[in-house]
Image (cartoon, grey):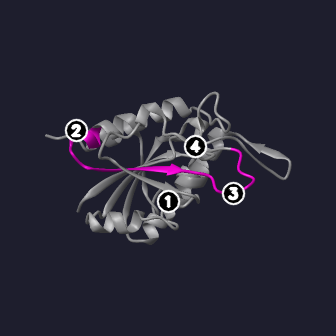
Amino acid sequence: MKTALLSIDIQNDYFENGTMSLVDAAQASRNARLILDKFRADNQSIVHIQHIATRPTATFFLPDTWGAEIHDTVKPLEGEKVIVKHYPNSFRETELFDYLSGQQITDLVICGMMTHMCVDATVRAAKDLGFNVILIGDACSTKSLEIQGQTVAADDVQKSFLAALNYFYSTVMTTQTYLEEHSKI
């Protein structure tokens, strides 16, 4: 059993002054940093996922912009793997599956942004591909959504998606619980 951290799309456009700011992105990134620090200290595999928009109508994560850069809170260190994607699912048309398989990774710890889109798509794909997944719920962020003229508050979106992913697709944990359960003795 070998574990890797996937840090998904924690990029500048999702923060204050970005073009697609999310609710509590700063706090989620600080929690993601705590998980990242643990993986670094334990010398475990880390993969940073960076979304670069390719759709002509895209309004965020545009190529070669500040907004598409990985946020300073979780900036990759030299030698840490960065995989660029163009779809919500981090496995789609990327080298992610082959890279993880080559490293004999069986388990993933996932954090990132947006919970209702790229995190959801990646968690579901990871499980379908045979990985065991722990999702760090408070190291993820989302936004309010609209459907049929009604607004669904970000907090409700977050809880709904985490609840849907818990059990079959992943085990959802808080940062504190994960760190307590995975501390070295």
Residue 44 coordinates in the image, percent (x, y): 24, 49
Query: Could you give the CA–CA distance between mark 4 and mark 2, rounded to whole angstroms?
Result: 31 Å
Q: Which residue is mark 4?
A: 64
Query: Could you give the CA–CA distance between mark 3 and mark 4, rounded to whole angstroms?
Result: 14 Å
Dot 3 or dot 4: first in sequence order is: 3
Asked whether the residues under the numbered discs 4 and 2 touch, taking CB atoms below 8 Å apart as contact, a structural biologist would say no
Span shown in magenta? 38-59
Identified at 57% across, 35% down, the residue is: 66
Which of discs 3 and 4 lies nearer the camera? The answer is 4
Q: Which residue is mark 1?
A: 90
Asked whether the residues under the numbered discs 3 and 2 touch, taking CB atoms below 8 Å apart as contact, a structural biologist would say no
Could you say whether the residue bearing mark 2 is in a helix, strand or loop?
helix
Query: Could you give the CA–CA distance between mark 1 and mark 3, rounded to whole angstroms?
Result: 16 Å
Residue 133 coordinates in the image, percent (x, y): 39, 58
Identified at 57% across, 51% down, the residue is: 52
Q: Which residue is mark 3?
A: 55
Query: Could you give the CA–CA distance between mark 4 and mark 1, rounded to whole angstroms?
Result: 20 Å
Amino acid found under the numbered disc labelled 4: Asp
Which of discs 4 and 2 lies nearer the camera? The answer is 4
Q: Which residue is mark 2?
A: 41
Amino acid found under the numbered disc labelled 1: Ser
Dot 1 or dot 3: first in sequence order is: 3
Find the residue positioned furthest to the bottom. 129
In the picture, which quadrant includes the N terminus?
bottom left
